[in-house]
Amino acid sequence: MADIERTYIMIKPDAVRDRKVGEIITRIERTGLTIERLDMATLDADTVREHYAHLADKPFFADLVAFMTSGPVVKMIVSGLGAIGKMRTIMGATNPLDAAPGTIRGDFAIDVNSNIIHGSDGPDTAAIEIRRFFGEDA
Ligand code: IDP
Ligand code: MG
């Protein structure tokens, strides 16, 4: 039996700009997972640099920071049985070219530079990201 988990989900600026928020939230709710918290914000560069620190040495890092600060994002805490893995499954592969049809990235994106959605990749990063984006008490 999977554990009850919490994961940090973020709809990226491209999807907000292209009015895909409603469809993406519908897909999350359809899984049976619970949206515990939801907010919009425009991220500052320091927060994005910290969030993507594992990619700091990549050639696309500056473009990634510019993209992620280019407009508002939708921040969520999503919880439920196996929430971390379930969200990664419905999101699809990082590169939308490899993401299966029926997944969020597979259906709504074509370019790895703007791949629609973020979801935590494990329990440790989920806890850190929930604190980063919703504060110590979340
Ligand atoms: P994930 O978002 O599926 O967890 P990560 O490897 O953690 O994938 O990468 C974080 C984000 O960095 C990706 O969602 C994407 O926005 C960006 N990214 C990753 N690899 C590339 C790349 O090769 N080119 C451009 N952007 C990338
Ligand atoms: Mg990741």
Image (tube, grey):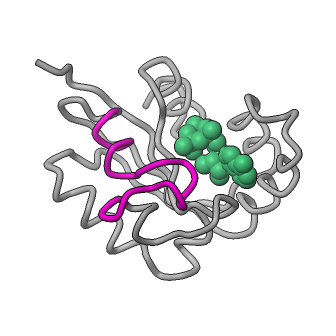
Residue appearing at x 47%, y 42% in the figure: 119
Q: Is residue 34 a member of the stretch shown in magenta?
A: no
Which quadrant of the rendered structure holds the N terminus?
top left
Residue 70 position, x and y percent, is 75, 68
In the depicted view, which residue is nearer to us: 95 or 138? 95
Query: Does 101 sit left or right of 98 as displayed?
Result: left
Above-or-below relation of 93 to 132: below
Q: Image quadrant of residue 73?
A: bottom right
* Residue found 17% across the figure and 21% down from its top: 2
Q: Between residues 107 and 127, which one lies in front from this camera angle? A: 107
Q: Is residue 97 magenta?
A: yes
* Residue drawn where x is 77% and y is 54% of the image: 64
Classified by dominant secondary structure, the portion drawn in magenta counts as loop
Residue nearest the viewer, comparing 127 with 40: 127
Where's the C terminus, which quadrant? top left
Question: How far from the left and from the top, in percent, is residue 133?
Answer: 56, 40
The image quadrant in which ligand 2 is located: top right
Question: Start and end of the magenta stretch?
Answer: 85-103
Report which quarter residue 8 is drawn in: top left
Residue at point 70%, 61% (across, down): 113
Residue 130 point in image, percent of width and height: 49, 33
Q: How many marks?
A: 0
Q: Is residue 54 above or below residue 38?
A: above
